[in-house]
Amino acid sequence: MIAPFPVGKTPDGKLIVEDLYRLPHMMVGGMTGYGKTSFLLGLMVATLLKGNKVSVIDRKGVDFPRFSPWVNLALTDAETEILLQKHIREMHRRQRILRKAGCQNFEEYCEEHDDLDYLVLILDELTQIRNKKCFEYIGDMSVLSRVSGISMVLATQKPNAKIWDGFTDVRSQLAGAMCFHVRDQIDSQIVLGSGNTRGSDLPKIKGRAIWNNDNDVMVQAMYLSAREAYAILNERVPKGAYKFAGNDECDERIDT
């Protein structure tokens, strides 16, 4: 796997591990206190342990700042737009690299080269994105970044219908969905897809969720505190966030 992360255990005790590269984008939703942040921390740590790179847009500004030694971090509106723009330019730069190398996608390129890191962008909290330019960046990445080795994880604790206002066709690009307990059937359908109300039927147990990647599976996600996540990274992962290429290398847009 290029970007493995633990989803959770099924009722019969099977551990589900998915490859984010195969998705390559996903949605995570759930009410406060039911495991969303812990799941994101686990995904982040698993990604960094694999040697991949992570960026985080943390609009609440409390869960991820301590991980700035390892990740590119955005907390404000201005920082969010800049970080998204860097990913867009990096995406187009990589498209040129793949084209020049005669490769169809990131995986094929990495069979003979080792100069591109796999990138994961975690965006928590999606409802706080209101900038039109940011909408465009996220929309472009959802459609075009899969071949370039860039994945997005979009998360929210308020998965109401307004969440997609300003976005165009983003929901259809999110192949994976992790839904912790949500308030009602409408919120469940926002995360899991139209007609899927299983998120609202979940028992109020921390970490209990519905994982959907074509099919629904009930899982118990593992718990990881921010303190434990920091200790793991501090012991096992060298500090240093991904360094994006200069702007002069990345301006040309290439649609694929």
Image: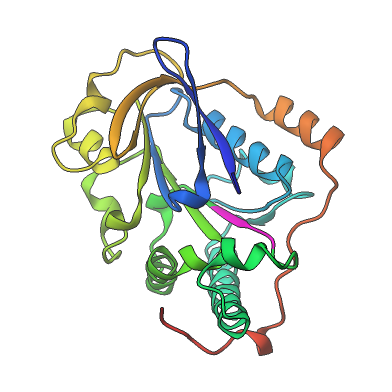
Picture residue at 63% right of the left edge, 58% below the top: 118
Left or right of 105, for residue 23: left
* Main secondary structure along the magenta-highlighted residues: strand
Q: Nearer the viewer, residue 201 or 50?
A: 50
**The magenta segment:** 117-121
Q: Residue 151, how many percent across, how many down?
A: 51, 56
- Quarter occupied by residue 91: bottom right
Please identify the quadrant where the C terminus is shown.
bottom left
Q: Residue 12, how many percent across, how many down?
A: 41, 9
Picture residue at 27% right of the left edge, 27% below the top: 199
Asked if residue 119 is among those painted magenta in the image, a careful observer would answer yes
Q: Residue 235, how many percent across, how many down?
A: 86, 33
Picture residue at 58% right of the left edge, 83% below the top: 96
Query: Does residue 107 lie above or below 71 as drawn?
Result: below
Q: Residue 78, how many percent across, how many down?
A: 56, 68
- Quarter occupied by residue 164: bottom left
Picture residue at 61% right of the left edge, 40% below the top: 62
Please identify the quadrant where the N terminus is shown.
top right
Asked if residue 5 is among those painted magenta in the image, a careful observer would answer no
Left or right of 248, for residue 37: left
Q: Nearer the viewer, residue 125 or 223?
A: 223
Query: Does residue 169 lie above or below 220 as drawn?
Result: below
Q: Residue furthest left?
A: 195
Left or right of 239, for residue 177: left
Query: Does residue 102 lie above or below 154 as drawn?
Result: below
Query: Does residue 68 lie above or below 12 as drawn?
Result: below
